[in-house]
Image: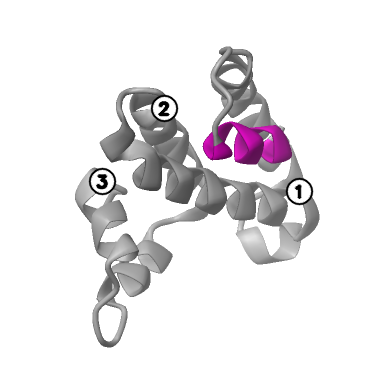
Amino acid sequence: MSITIELLDSMLAPSPGNPAEAHYRTIPLDSRVRELTTLLTQLHGENAANAGRCMLAAVLLRREVETLAGKHQLTGLAPSSAVSLMGEIANPLMSLFLQNEVTQSRRQIGHII
């Protein structure tokens, strides 16, 4: 189970019963955070076709980080693991944010940071 471009595309074009969202929720939180960060890094600034995917990845990551930061009992992770995970994604997110492009996904990345 992982987050792929195909999964993001499925989430952008929902179908009855939302199977893509159901699949997304089965992925462990720490994997979602790492994989969304990786996808965001890959998709950010590549081309206009990836703008929707990039924005969705940023919004999903923002929600996951909010969960990590404020609801330790719901994450299944020890607080030290959550803090470590947030530290792990900090540098890639800062690198994306400091690029000179002004995009909606950059704004979401700023909210995550």
Q: Residue at 54% across / 19% down in the picture?
A: 101
Q: Is residue 91 above or below residue 6?
A: above
Between marks 1 and 2, how big is the CA–CA gap? 24 Å
Q: Mark 2 belongs to which amino acid?
A: His
Q: Mark 3 belongs to which amino acid?
A: Thr
Circles 1 and 2, Cβ within 8 Å, touching? The answer is no
Q: Is residue 54 above or below residue 106?
A: below
Q: Which residue is identified by label 2?
A: 44
Disc 2 secondary structure class: loop
Question: Magenta span: helix, strand or loop, mainly?
Answer: helix
Measured as percent of width and height from the top left, residue 34 is found at 46, 36
Between marks 2 and 3, how big is the CA–CA gap? 15 Å
Q: Nearer the viewer, mark 1 or mark 2?
A: 2
Q: Which residue is identified by label 1?
A: 69
Res. 95 image quadrant: top right
- In the picture, measured across the screen, residue 95 lies left or right of residue 84, that is left
Q: Nearer the viewer, residue 106 or 17?
A: 106
Q: Residue at 75% across / 45% down in the picture?
A: 79
Q: Is residue 15 above or below residue 35?
A: below
Residue 4: mark: 3
Q: Earlier in the sequence, mark 2 or mark 3?
A: 3
Between marks 3 and 1, how big is the CA–CA gap? 24 Å
Magenta segment, which residues? 104-112
Q: Nearer the viewer, mark 2 or mark 3?
A: 2
- In the picture, measured across the screen, residue 17 lies left or right of residue 28, that is left
Colouring scheme applied when the structure was drawn: one colour
Measured as percent of width and height from the top left, residue 43 is found at 35, 30
